[in-house]
């Protein structure tokens, strides 16, 4: 089975903001600040509506057969339409199980609206049984079907009062969690031209999501202890082999947390 874990990073769609709110003549920074101010007046916070989020990175963990890969779609110069096309092409080609953390609440609605803006087609993704009868009973759009597993939504039993942040859940399980950046800092990083930093951060997020998903597969009995450890080792081997700086940092932090946890367990037993 093919599994595609995904995460997106976004910035304000300042071009759309200029069109919708009459912000012509303002530079990107001023236009974004005006959009934030309008949103604060409306809701008390500056989190923009989904359709006004422009995608600057989609990162993925792809698990297929006996292989795993972690990467960000497109190169650093890729525009939003190209990034979207690459994401939906993966679905058209492989029909993977999608896995996310808050994908139903954020990532997928943003992908939907931005695909609409750019006219990016994906018949497989949108199929609800018209082309493939199997998709009537298990498709990407239904909340309760497992072609897309939103781990945050599922673990909270679809109750937003029980939602938890990915980094906290990952840290509780002994995984690295957030490293160096957060979604709130992406706009600042983008303005500074740090596209690589955004992409690296997004990749560590999908790694955390994949590791949490493996633990979920363990508790639901899809994999046993030996299989779970084998999957963790596959991730570690991949990170060592790729040896990219943020992968190395992620692995070092992960192994450091594991070592600390083992020491604490030994101290408890000795006590």
Image: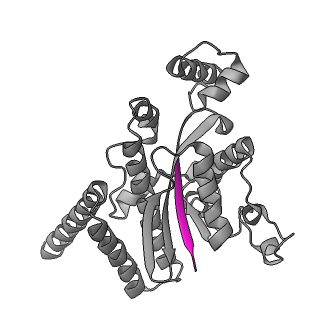
Quarter of the image for the C terminus: give it: bottom left
Please indicate, yes or no, whether residue 107 appears anywhere in the rendered image: no
On the image, the x and y values in percent for residue 122 come to 73, 59
Q: Nearer the viewer, residue 18 or 214?
A: 18
Colour convention: one colour
Magenta segment range?
1-8
Classify residue 15 as left or right of residue 248. Answer: right
Please indicate, yes or no, whether residue 81 appears anywhere in the rendered image: yes
Q: Main secondary structure of the magenta part?
A: strand
Kindly give the residue lying farthest to the left in the view shown.
270
Give residue 193's quadrant in the image.
top left
Residue name at image x 52 percent, y 46 percent: 78
Q: Nearer the viewer, residue 93 or 154?
A: 93
Instruction: From this view, report whether residue 177 is shown above or below residue 181.
Output: below
Residue name at image x 66 percent, y 21 percent: 18
Give residue 136's quadrant in the image.
bottom right
Classify residue 29 as left or right of residue 110. Answer: left
On the image, the x and y values in percent for residue 168 come to 40, 53
Kindly give the residue lying farthest to the top in the view shown.
25
On the image, the x and y values in percent for residue 66 come to 45, 83
Instruction: From this view, report whether residue 214 is shown above or below residue 199.
Output: below
Classify residue 236 as left or right of residue 15. Answer: left
On the image, the x and y values in percent for residue 244 come to 29, 59
Quarter of the image for the N terminus: give it: bottom right
Question: Is 224 within the magenta?
Answer: no
Residue name at image x 65 percent, y 45 percent: 110
């Amino acid at each position: 089975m093919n599994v595609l874990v995904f995460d997106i990073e976004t910035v304000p769609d300042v071009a759309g903001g200029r069109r919708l709110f009459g912000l012509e003549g303002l530079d990107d920074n001023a236009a974004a600040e005006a959009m934030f101010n309008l949103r604060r007046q409306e809701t008390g916070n500056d989190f923009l509506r989904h359709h006004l989020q422009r995608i600057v990175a989609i990162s993925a963990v792809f698990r297929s057969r006996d292989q795993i890969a972690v990467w960000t779609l497109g190169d650093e110069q890729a525009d939003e339409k190209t990034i979207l096309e690459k994401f939906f092409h993966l679905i058209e080609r492989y029909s993977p199980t999608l896995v996310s953390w808050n994908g139903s609440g954020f990532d997928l609605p943003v992908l939907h609206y931005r695909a609409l803006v750019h006219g990016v087609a994906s018949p497989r993704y949108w199929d609800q049984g018209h082309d493939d009868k199997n998709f009537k009973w298990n498709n990407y759009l239904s909340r309760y079907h497992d072609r897309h597993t939103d781990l945050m939504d599922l673990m909270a039993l679809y109750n937003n009062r029980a939602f938890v942040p990915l980094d906290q859940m990952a840290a509780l399980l002994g995984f690295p969690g957030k490293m160096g950046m957060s979604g709130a800092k992406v706009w600042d990083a983008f303005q500074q031209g740090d596209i690589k930093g955004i992409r690296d951060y997004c990749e560590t997020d999908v790694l955390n999501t994949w590791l949490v998903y493996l633990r979920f597969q363990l508790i639901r009995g899809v994999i046993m202890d030996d299989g779970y450890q084998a999957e963790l080792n596959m991730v570690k081997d991949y990170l060592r082999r790729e040896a990219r700086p943020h992968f190395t940092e992620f692995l070092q932090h992960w192994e450091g947390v594991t070592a600390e946890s083992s020491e604490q367990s030994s101290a408890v037993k000795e006590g």
